[in-house]
């Protein structure tokens, strides 16, 4: 999987290229400016917008190892075990560099320490910050840390310090052109009649990638029933997708934007969420 498999989101791809990919692909140029390969990016946005998909594609662009870190890989009920698991995960990435280390739902591991009641949980956040810094400047060279969250305002502010997850990148809901491109990719391995993906994109406003995948799956299920009765594959048509779209609603974008609006308008003294201002002022 590469960026060619990710429809739209050109601004997000470019941010990942400059911050993470090009330092590994053109090390001499970056070394001339004292920049090393490695670092971290925090991807945030509504659920289902493609954050995990982007992380896998970034690893594919490099031909790098991809380590997808789940909460069950880190969290442990015994004191000190979670910190050891986190250290072992970073050690694994350092031994297999270049490596993309991906933390999904990172707010569960990097939440605001001021909100935590237990010292053990705060200690895990401290360990995470220590691993991002490394024991020396070259410790994490070649280790690209990607983290994703739906609630970036719950992530401890210390993670946004330079050298850590210092570049929050908003992964927006796809626009009409991106939705059409996503549908094209989702349908490319299926028997198709002549398709008008733009027409489907126009009636799926506020759908994210996960919603569009569900739409295609529903249309395919209906077409399979017809194909079984006919005894042969019947091509998927634009009308099939439009019919499926009538039965579905966007999952979580409106709710997410309503929450984001509260933080952007009323809890943004630092300016951390200025990037969201044009989005939250839109009609959702």
Image (cartoon, helix red, strand yellow):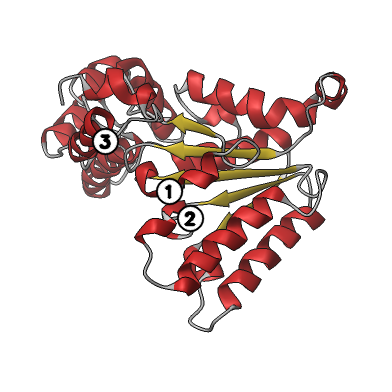
Q: Quadrant of the C terminus?
A: top left
Q: Residue at x 65, y 72 (%)?
A: 84
Mark on residue 263? 3
Q: CA distance from mark 3 to mark 1?
A: 13 Å
User: Real-space Cα distance between discs 2 and 1?
Assistant: 6 Å
Q: Residue at x 41, y 73 (%)?
A: 118
Res. 172 image quadrant:
top left
- The residue at which mark 2 appears reads as 110
User: Where does residue 246 sit, x and y in percent of width and height?
Assistant: 11, 33
Q: Is residue 203 above or below residue 88?
A: above
- The dot on residue 280 is none
Residue 66 can be seen, yes or no: no
- In the drawing, does residue 202 fall left or right of residue 276? left
Callout 2 environment at 10 Å: few (<14), some (14 to 19), or many (20+)?
A: many
Q: Secondary structure at mark 1?
A: loop
Residue 69 falls left or right of residue 19: left
Instruction: Say which label, 2 or 1, has the lower sequence index.
Output: 2
Label 3 CA crowd tier, 10 Å (few <14, some 14–19, many 20+): some
Residue 32 relative to residue 73: left or right:
right
Q: Residue furthest left?
A: 246
Q: Which residue is mark 1?
A: 155
Say few, some or many: other residues with alpha carbon within 10 Å of mark 1 (under 14 / 14 to 19 / 20 or more).
many
Residue 219 position in % (x across, y down): 24, 39
Task: Give percent across and percent down for residue 204.
Answer: 21, 26
Q: Nearer the N terminus, badge 3 or badge 1?
A: 1
Q: In the image, is 140 to the left or to the right of 223? A: right
Residue at 21%, 42% (x, y): give it.
Answer: 251
Q: Are dots 2 and 1 in contact, CB under 8 Å? A: yes
Identify whether 113 is placed above or below 47.
below
Q: Are marks 3 and 2 in contact (CB under 8 Å)?
A: no
């Amino acid at each position: 999987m590469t960026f060619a498999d990710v429809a739209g989101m050109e601004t997000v791809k470019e941010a990942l290229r400059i911050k993470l990919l090009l330092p590994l692909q053109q090390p001499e140029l970056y070394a001339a400016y004292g920049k090393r390969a490695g670092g971290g990016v925090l991807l945030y946005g509504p659920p289902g917008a493609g954050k995990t998909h982007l992380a896998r594609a970034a690893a594919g662009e490099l031909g790098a190892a991809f380590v997808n870190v789940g909460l069950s890989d880190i969290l442990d009920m015994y004191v000190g075990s979670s910190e050891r698991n986190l250290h072992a995960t970073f050690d694994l990435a350092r031994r297999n560099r270049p490596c993309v280390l991906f933390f999904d739902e990172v707010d569960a591991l990097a939440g605001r320490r001021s909100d935590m009641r237990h010292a053990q949980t705060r200690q895990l956040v401290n360990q995470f910050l220590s691993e991002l810094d490394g024991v020396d400047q070259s410790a994490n060279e070649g280790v690209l840390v990607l983290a994703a969250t739906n609630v970036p305002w719950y992530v401890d502010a210390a993670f946004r310090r330079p050298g850590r997850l210092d570049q929050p990148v908003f992964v927006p809901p796809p626009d009409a052109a991106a939705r059409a491109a996503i549908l094209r990719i989702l349908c490319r391995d299926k028997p198709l009649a002549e398709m008008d993906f733009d027409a489907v994109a126009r009636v799926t406003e506020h759908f994210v990638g996960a919603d569009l995948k569900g739409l295609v799956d529903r249309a395919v299920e209906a077409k399979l029933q017809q194909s079984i009765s006919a005894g042969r594959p019947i091509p998927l048509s634009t009308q099939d997708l439009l019919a499926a779209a009538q039965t579905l609603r966007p999952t979580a974008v409106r709710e997410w934007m309503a929450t984001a609006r509260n933080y952007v308008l009323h809890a943004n003294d630092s300016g951390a969420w200025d990037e969201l201002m044009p989005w939250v002022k839109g009609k959702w």
